[in-house]
Amino acid sequence: MANIKIRHITRYTYNAPVLDSANQILLYPLDDLHQQVVLHELRISQNPVVETFTDFFGNTAGVFTILKPHTELVIQSSIQVQTEPVLMPVDLKPAKEQWDILHVIDDQFPYADFLTQEKFQSRPEVHDEVAGLMNSELTPLSIATNMAAFVFNNFEYKQGITSVETGIDEVWSLKAGVCQDFAHMLLVMLRMIGIPSRYVSGYICPAEQEFRGAGATHAWVDAYIPDYGWIGLDPTNNCIASDRHVRLATGRNFSDCTPVKGTYKGQADHSLEVSVIIENDHPASVPEEVTIQPTYSYKVHMPTMELNSYQKFMEMQQQQQQQ
């Protein structure tokens, strides 16, 4: 068992006042047999009322609105969880029977949602690699772990070359990225061979420095194994997700699990900074008032607004009148 404390700080800064900021947060850790939530506290600028609901994928989501003009939005989530080691599946059925089960459930709820395959240009190349790894004499778990190892061994963990908008074609071309890209790649490969797979967002909390992706939000994949259920595969670290992985949300892809997203009124450029502080098996030692360096930062410049269809129509009308 691991006792883990995490502080996750999201800070939006605007260069001019904005208003009517409507937001959704997926910052509520999952609570089940493998992960028990001991404490969860939220602090949000201007103390808005946060309403919660359970989304389609079983995650707890929060929504809130800040109506007054503001130049900063800070969301701080502090959690304490106890996690249990994950027991590896035991093959009670031959490989063929397990693959037959996957063929039967591929159009059933909820598995069909996690088998939807996306369209991308490099699909034939990826399919060729997947076909080379596929062997129906091996169990689904063996194939899934082999594919996670393939991503780990053939893709470079490199920060700063991809973003949340990076598609699978670019990741495949670069053969590099971060945990989100590794998870995205593994999802595509597993779904190609009929293994239901879902995206998982959360944190990785090493006892020492044994994992990549620590000190920030993390992502991995849950694969469905017959007669066992969902098991986490972390292609960034080539391991089974166990008691050092803290889960926040699951979904079909990153957009289903985005920790914070929202909209606002205003034309201001803005910057995003995210800080994650993780402490294992001992009381928190970072004072609240200490300035913490962000582990992730991103600046957004508002693009020049293009004419909408009605404005274009009016412009054409005016040009015709002038001729």
Image (spheres, grey):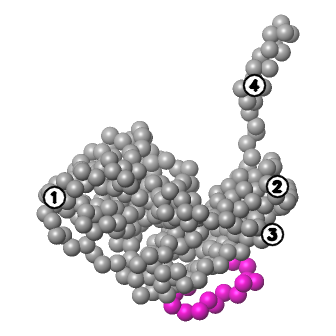
Which sits in the foreground, 129 or 198? 198
User: Which of the two discs, 4 and 1, labels the residue nearer the N terminus?
Assistant: 1
Q: Position of residue 294 (x, y in %)?
A: 66, 71
| Residue named by callout 2 | 19
Residue type highlighted by circle 4: Tyr
Q: Position of residue 217 (x, y in %)?
A: 54, 69
Q: Is residue 237 left or right of residue 274?
A: left
Badge 4: how crowded within 10 Å, few (<14), some, or many (20+)?
A: few
Measure the alpha-carbon separation of dots 3 and 1: 56 Å
Q: Position of residue 196 (x, y in %)?
A: 34, 55
| Residue named by callout 4 | 310
Magenta-span inclusion, residue 245: no
Residue 97 tag number: 1
Circle 4 SS class: helix
Residue range corresponding to the magenta coloring: 279-294
Which sits in the foreground, 19 or 134? 19
